[in-house]
């Protein structure tokens, strides 16, 4: 019993000291922890060119590449990626399964409320893949809502799924597609009429599929350009701030453009907007 | 993580939608398993070696491969040869045929339990094979195996979340999509568990009753 009181007292003291300390203290802690273990765990989605896992298991893609460089500058040698569904990333982050999300998870107000985003990194508009000639004449999410026969496929918990639901497409016409290849297959088989992903992802997928019977509608009418950022736990704001400092340096030195432009992303788009703008954008 | 009752009531209608599909898939799957299982059991006893061997091989094959792989095959590969089934139909066929190979064994045991003398008596009274099956053998074979069959159907019910892998919007898939858009797993996943538990517990009571009613025919 005595020991328990003692433990309680000690843990209370620890709690108090954490609460009383400046926020930087806790964050330094987090960064120190990461430095000590030598790697940071990041969540990715395997959706080229945002995030990709090669046949040899090597992680690439614009988002992890940027994160790897910045974490190295912060003194964390390596990033270890795990593939996750978009919708499962934020709960996974909150549950401590990842240290950061670097997956092209676009900033939206409700996501900004749930996590601490870095400044914008990758920006892109939304696109549709459709059958050749766009037989249902779909150019916006609203068109899909209005056509009672049209079915849209999108990644579970991704921005596209939310946009479709917000535009009024009923749940049973929004098909959750597990990955890009299944999406193309379902489109070819006629199980879905539209497969929606960001522009660069759709182009990457179409290049790989090489199917002359499919075409791309881009950008989707009425859907603005979204930007992602690295997402951290709310309590790791200071780690996020440290990340932002290095990101800013990277952007200013021009290395940022060198990292992401080969993947097709525009560095200018990311540098001309801010987290605050993206997080408060209407929609 | 705190339990939020408001959120529970907010997501309940969506989960119930999914639950309906789960129940529907289970009932249809059970029908498929019951009918095809019986056909497999009878075909396996066929005097023609080619038929019984083929059926035996096919059942072993289906039983020896994972249901999830079969579902992917039916959903993603069959369209290549021009068979495009809706997700629910593909799922019902997949789960129904898979469980048919198990129920076939139950039927076989039931049929073998009918004393040989019954066959001889059927022959002696000049019944055709067909008449012997329908009027003599099956009526005696089926009641004792009802509890065992029901057991498989309950097992099948608990396997239906696999259908979420082929985009069927059943309970598990609805719960996942709720979690995906609200970043909360605790309520939807707990409720999925509660739904399944409630039905399983009720089924156990039903199963007991079936056992009382059918399992001991001799009493």
Image (cartoon, rainbow, N blue to C red):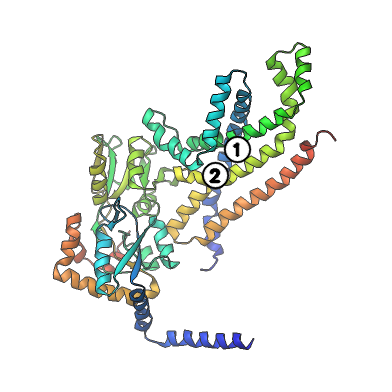
Horizontally, residue A102 falls left or right of residue A203, namely: right
**Residue ID for mark 1:** B27
Question: Residue A180 at x, y = what percent?
Answer: 33, 46
The answer, for residue A32, to whether it is visible in the render is yes
Residue in the foreground of this view, choosing between A187 and A64: A64
Disc 2 to disc 1, how far (Cα)?
11 Å
Question: Residue B124 at x, y = what percent?
Answer: 78, 12
| Residue extending furthest toward the left | A254
Question: Residue A264 at x, y = what percent?
Answer: 19, 54
The chain letter for the residue carrying disc 1 is: B
Horizontally, residue B204 falls left or right of residue B69, namely: right
The chain letter for the residue carrying disc 2 is: B
Horizontally, residue B212 falls left or right of residue A217, namely: right
Q: Residue at x 42, y 87 (%)?
A: A20
Crowd tier of the residue under label 2, counting other residues whose Cα lies within 10 Å: few below 14, some 14–19, many 20 or above: many
Secondary structure state at the residue bearing disc 2: helix
Mark positioned earlier in the residue sequence (2 or 1)? 1
Q: Residue at x 55, y 54 (%)?
A: B12
The label shown at residue B160 is: 2
* CB under 8 Å between discs 2 and 1: no
| Quadrant showing the C terminus of chain B | top right
Mark whose residue sits in front, 2 or 1: 2
Residue B21 quadrant: top right
Q: Residue at x 16, y 63 (%)?
A: A257
The answer, for residue A267, to whether it is visible in the render is no
Question: Residue A212 at x, y = what percent?
Answer: 23, 35
């Amino acid at each position: 019993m005595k020991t328990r009181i003692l433990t309680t007292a000690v843990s209370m003291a620890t709690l108090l000291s954490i609460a009383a300390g400046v926020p930087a203290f806790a964050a330094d802690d987090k960064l120190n922890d990461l430095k000590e273990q030598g790697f940071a765990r990041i969540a990715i989605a395997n959706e080229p060119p945002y995030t990709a896992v090669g046949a040899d298991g090597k992680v690439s893609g614009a988002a992890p590449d940027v994160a790897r460089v910045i974490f190295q500058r912060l003194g964390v040698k390596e990033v270890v990626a795990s593939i996750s569904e978009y919708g499962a990333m934020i709960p996974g982050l909150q549950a401590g399964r990842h240290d950061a999300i670097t997956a092209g998870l676009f900033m939206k107000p409700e996501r900004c409320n749930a996590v601490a985003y870095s400044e914008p990194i990758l920006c892109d508009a939304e696109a549709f893949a459709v059958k050749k000639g766009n037989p249902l004449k779909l150019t916006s999410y609203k068109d899909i809502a209005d056509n009672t026969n049209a079915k849209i496929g999108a990644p579970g918990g991704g921005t596209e799924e939310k946009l479709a639901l917000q535009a009024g497409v009923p749940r049973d016409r929004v098909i959750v597609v597990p990955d890009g290849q299944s999406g193309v297959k379902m489109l070819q088989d006629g199980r879905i009429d539209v497969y929606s992903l960001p522009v660069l992802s759709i182009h990457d997928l179409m290049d790989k599929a090489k199917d002359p019977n499919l075409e791309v509608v881009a950008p989707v009418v009425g859907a603005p350009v979204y930007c992602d950022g690295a997402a951290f736990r709310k309590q790791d704001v200071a780690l996020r701030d440290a990340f932002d400092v290095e990101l800013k340096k990277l952007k200013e030195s021009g290395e940022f453009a060198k990292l992401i432009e080969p993947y097709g992303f525009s560095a200018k788009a990311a540098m001309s907007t801010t987290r605050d703008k993206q997080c408060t954008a209407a929609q | 993580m705190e339990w939020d009752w408001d959120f529970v009531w907010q997501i309940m209608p969506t989960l119930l939608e999914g639950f309906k599909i789960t129940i529907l898939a289970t009932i249809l799957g059970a029908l498929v398993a019951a009918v095809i299982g019986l056909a497999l059991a009878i075909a396996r006893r066929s005097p023609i070696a080619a038929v019984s061997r083929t059926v035996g091989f096919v059942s072993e094959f289906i039983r020896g491969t994972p249901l999830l792989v079969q579902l992917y095959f039916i959903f993603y590969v069959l369209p290549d040869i021009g068979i495009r089934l809706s997700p629910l139909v593909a799922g019902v066929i997949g789960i129904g045929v898979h469980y048919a190979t198990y129920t076939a064994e139950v039927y076989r045991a039931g049929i073998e339990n009918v004393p040989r003398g019954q066959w001889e008596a059927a022959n002696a009274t000049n019944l055709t094979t067909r008449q012997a099956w329908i009027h003599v053998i099956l009526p005696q074979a089926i009641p004792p195996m009802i509890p065992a069959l029901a057991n498989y159907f309950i097992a099948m019910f608990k396997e239906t979340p696999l259908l979420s892998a082929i985009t069927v919007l059943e309970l598990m898939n609805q719960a996942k999509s709720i979690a995906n858009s609200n970043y909360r797993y605790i309520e939807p996943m707990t409720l999925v568990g509660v739904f399944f538990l409630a039905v399983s517990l009720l089924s156990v009571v039903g199963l007991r009753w079936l056992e009382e009613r059918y399992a001991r025919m001799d009493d």
